[in-house]
Image: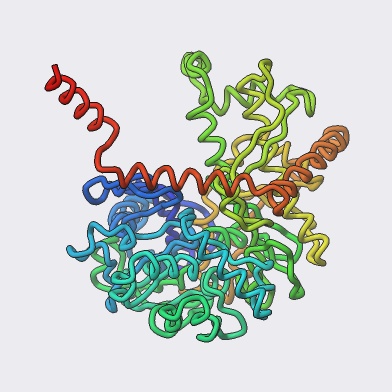
Amino acid sequence: MAADDAVVIGVDFGTLSGRALVVRVSDGAELGTAVHEYDHGVMDSRLTAHQNQPLPPEWALQVPADYVNVLKNAVPAAVRDAGVSPEQVIGIGTDFTACTMVPTTSDGTPLNELEQYADRPHAYVKLWKHHAAQGQADRINELAHSRNEPWIGRYGGFISSEWEFAKGLQLLEEDPELYEAMDHWVEAADWIIWQLTGEYVRNACTAGYKGIYQDGKYPDEDFLTALNPEFAGFVREKLDHTIGQLGSQAGTLTKQAAEWTGLPEGIAVAVGNVDAHVTAPAADAVEPGQMVAIMGTSTCHVMNGETLAEVPGMCGVVDGGITEGAYGYEAGQSGVGDIFAWYVRNQVPGDYAAEAEARGISLHELLTEKSQDQPVGAHGLIALDWHSGNRSVLVDHELSGLILGQTLATTPEDGYRALLESTAFGTRTIIEAFNTSGVPVRELVVAGGLLKNRFLMQTYADITGLEISTITSSQGPALGSAIHAAVAAGAYEDVRSAGAVMGGRTRAAYVPDPQRAEAYSALFGEYTKLHDYFGRGENDVMRRLKAIRRDAVTQADSAPHSADQLTSDQTEQEAVNG
């Protein structure tokens, strides 16, 4: 086979679906793609995989078999779409949302697939946006600071409820029998590689950013014991395993995985990775100061830096966390596209939906069109973008969303624009934290599905004051995984050189408008005041409201009858009483 004919496959496992992309190794040309939706989607209110039982607030679960179905369906479909022969494929790479955790037996079988545990919510995948472990995260943070643990500064001073230790501690404390039955606490990014290769290899990215693995070690057993004596062996018994470096080969495709995918047995399989981090080389943006914002349901910000620094509220800094030879920084916003979708789904009247349908456009397009020509500040609103909590810089998923300034004259498009702006204010808050910590952001490179909203992109430029470059590919994570597959297969020396050929971006696609930028700076001052007032402990009403909600839902779930049953029982009793 000629070198120019070789292709690789990148598979991006997202929140609701998985996408496979076939990429030519020689130039990064994208030849074919296919998507497979997860059969069970996200289970955040009911365990639809088993008897539809209700779930507590802040839960988000998935079914691991849905991920295997992506391999069985999207990969062969993408190869057909590309019009290439399977024999041309020399490697496959994958990326995943993180931190997404799978409890397994010693051979990698997810606990939910064992009949005796199928009705136990803790036996299922805990998706990245499972935020029910905030109490455990609070305890981890408090203990780390009280003991002056050296690793806490590498995470901006906070360990998130989304991450491995908080979710693992929640599992132990809420279902100890299941915790005891679990042999491995596995990132989904590594579990899918296990399915492809038959080898369990932890990837350096999630181990560093989500697993508190710094300088070759995890938190010690004294720390874990102080959290909970039964948690003492968590690292040694449930977590620790061989760690693979990014771009290296985790193994080769097994016979079974070859049958699933239709690919040749024995081709290279790259070490697992995270959707955000693989996108940096896909955008050819791995130089220090190039912050890549992957904007979708949430936003993840990743950037290489030349030096090691502690940035308040960052998700982490890991040596080689993005590419070898640089300190990889990560921050993020837990809700962005999710917030816009919530607003459109719940806060827009029917006549707007009818207008959008009649014109053949989406409600997002309609609301953007109606609001984009307003002068900055004309809606009189400020919003806090915390509907899914705050990942950076406050790292608190007990926080919640807010829109301030509404009057009887406020329109749906006003609220929508205020939410768009709030997410840009959140990104600016992150950028300023990096700048003031000695890790300067010089260029903002945007990838992800929200790129299609040109007004949103211009708003980000105006609010951040930075020129915005945009990734060339519309499939950044999948392309990034394909780049890692090419390196794992030996086609390139390293990820940086592969990205320079196979990736790309449009430089300065959006440039700040000086007048709008000045007006937005005044509004950002108001955002910052609200941000600090509600987010830094001066007023913890958001936490109190979430506690009240949890208590109310718990009491309702534990009641002997549902509201409908009570009504029925009362009616029957009234009939008996005549």
- Residue for point 57% across, 62% down: 160
Res. 573 visible in picture: yes
Left or right of residue 376: residue 545: left
- Which of the 4 quarters of the picture holds residue 148? bottom right
Residue 370, image x, y percentages: 65, 20
Counting every numbered tag in the picture gives 0
Question: Who's the residue at 34% across and 56% down the image?
Answer: 75
* Residue found at x 80% / y 62%: 440
The foreground one among 362 and 148 is 148
Q: Position of residue 387 (x, y in %)?
A: 57, 43
- The residue depicted at 51 percent of the width and 22 percent of the height is 361
Q: Quadrant of the C terminus?
A: top left
Q: Is residue 266 above or below residue 386?
A: below
Color scheme of the displayed model = rainbow
For the question of whether residue 36 can be seen, the reply is no
Percent x, y for residue 526? 80, 39
Seen from this angle, which residue lies furthest front? 577
Q: Is residue 51 left or right of residue 195?
A: left
Whole-percent x and y of residue 50? Answer: 23, 51
The quarter of the rendered structure image containing the N terminus is bottom left
| Pick the front one: 504 or 154 | 154
Q: Is residue 568 above or below residue 282?
A: above
